[in-house]
Image (spheres, rainbow, N blue to C red):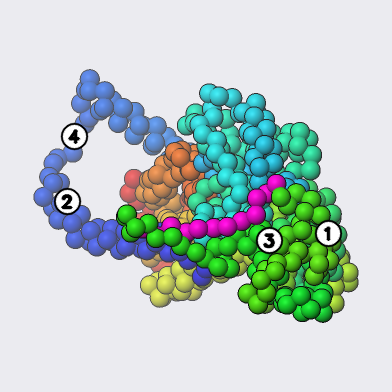
Amino acid sequence: QGIARFLFVPMAEAVIFAMVSSFILSRTLVPTMARYLLRPHAAHAARESRNPLVRFQRGFETRFARARDHYHALLQLALSHRRVFIVGFVGVVLASFLLVPLLGRNFFPAVDSGQILMHVRLQVGTRVEDSATVFAAIEKAIRRVIPPAELGTLVDNIGMPVSGINLSYNNTGTIGTQDGDIQIALKPVHRPTAEYVKTLREQLPARFPGATFSFLPADIVSQILNFGSPAPIDLQVRGPDLAADFRYAAELLRRIRLVPGVADARIQESPSNPGFNINVDRAQAQYLGLTERDVTNSLLVMLAGSSQVAPTFWLDPQNGVQYPIVMQEPQYRVDTLSELQNLPISATTTAVPQVLGAVASVSRNASNAVVSQYNIQSMVQIYATTQGRDLGAVAADISKILDDTAHEAPKGSTIALLGQVQTMNSAFAGLLFGLLGAIVLIYLLIVVNFQSWSDPFVIVCALPAALAGIVWMLFATGTTLSVPALTGAIMCMGVATANSVLVVSFARERLEELGDPVAAALEAGFVRFRPVLMTALAMIIGMAPMALALGEGGEQNAPLGRAVIGGLACATVATLVFVPVVFSLVHRKYSRDVAPSAIIGEPHVA
């Protein structure tokens, strides 16, 4: 469900249809081609050849036979000490899961897209022309950090509307003229983007005190994963008392900034936006023939223009085009409080205009720059992102802070931790359920086909080793546990099970002929050594480019490739050694008469 469904259902469908098509072709086209292409020939000794390909193939076969003989001796040793080997193997697998808390959790890995999106907020109430001056200085500071050889373009957006959907359609959290965005595009050859972000995050606040800098997701995938939020961590304080919510949010912000790995923590709304409080004397206004509506309309026309109160258009008689005419008081005439009080107030009921100071008192005050609401309830939002630490650990520390300060929350207020955290937890729960469900369904499917409960258990006993291999691979490469990694774990289950089926099915056949489970397990491992390795190596080699994060945005799917490679590597070892040992132990009570010609322990087919 949710975002995980839209991201991975297409991949799951592609894998399913590919496997179905492969099964159909293996049962139809492959036998037909074998019938026409494979010719009978008499056995003969290999002749000398100078062909480099032939020499390479013969050398490979010789080395492969030597490796298989070593494996045969190793498997024979494990079968001779079955209980000790099983206890040791299971102990290593269980100990591997102790590394899981050290992996960390992220919804998706960060992608180096070569783009940086920075949101800057100056002191609330800064005029747009003053903001432009400061932004020009910030751009110069950025150019000193990023060398010209790596800097592509640098664009700033200042003076955007509070609701960016209508004009610029941005979700960076603009609440006034003091806000602006700086978009930085790096050239194809550049240092890691995260290094520049870290440097800018350290230097810019020191050079521009009073300004707040926050780095937002620049690539479209991260923006989608944030669900429109400008940060992966969105903490909302909702309640009826907005002033109390601001005080509580300020205390939360102070504690959250102390959490290791938290960066760009800030409160989105601001209660300190400078403004004027105009208190109309209704009795005096009525005596002068004015109403509060007259005062409001006159102020809007003077300060914001007449386009909203009384839109006026002029029709050009030459081209027939209507042009809007907007009237507004010049800025230089409202620079002081006394000039503001001298603004004329007019009405349709009186011909003599009055000044604002005659009917109202004007005083300075601080107000909310913007009021955010959720379900018609005011709220205060705290945004934060992570740096140098996984999202799961940071979210756990923030949740602990919320628990510790729950008694300080304003009466009637609720606190919600949203953003990627909530989606990550739900996606992880769904994928873990899918992983367990896949193992159970695989087991039941094999039970139906093998008509046995014990042999399917032998087959699936290699899957914990695959999970241990995934843990070791992620730990060795410094990769956090994420949705792609869990998806790779689910994919790995199928291939690991298929290899175990190859070994166990052949062991069952040899058990019927030899009557000795140890000999049957030894021969099954020896004979199925090549096909098991071929299947595993084909998958591992195919996943290698993905695991190396090659190409633009390759970091997004690198955990998937690494999980598959690590899981298959350990699952292959378990299939070739652990599964035969468990098979011989499960069938240790099997006994029947064996034909005298049967040679116990000798490989049946090489």
Residue 360: percent from the left, percent from the top? 81, 68
Q: CA distance from mark 4 to mark 2?
A: 22 Å
**Residues at discs 4 and 2 in contact (Cβ within 8 Å):** no
**C-alpha span from label 3 to label 1:** 32 Å
Q: Label 1's element?
A: strand
Magenta-tinted stretch: 321-332
Q: Is residue 323 magenta?
A: yes
Q: Amino acid at mark 4?
A: His
Marks 4, 3: nearer the viewer: 3
The circle on residue 191 is: none
Mark 3 against mark 1, which lies toward the viewer?
Answer: 1
Label 3 sits on what residue type? Asp
Q: Quadrant of residue 578?
A: bottom right
Relative height, residue 584 to residue 191 (above, below): below
Q: Which residue is depicted at the point 67% across and 74% down? A: 350
Quickly name the residue at label 3.
234
Furthest residue toward top: 50
State the residue at coordinates (83%, 59%).
364
Q: Which residue corresponds to mark 4?
A: 44
Instruction: Identify the mark nearer the N-term, 3 or 1.
Output: 3
First in sequence: mark 2 or mark 3?
Answer: 2
Pointer 1: what residue? 364
Q: Secondary structure at mark 2?
A: helix
Quadrant where the C terminus lies? top left
In front: label 2 or label 3: 3
Distance from Cα at disc 2 to Cα at disc 3: 61 Å
On the question of residue 41 being in view, the answer is yes
x and y, in percent, of residue 171 in the image? 58, 56
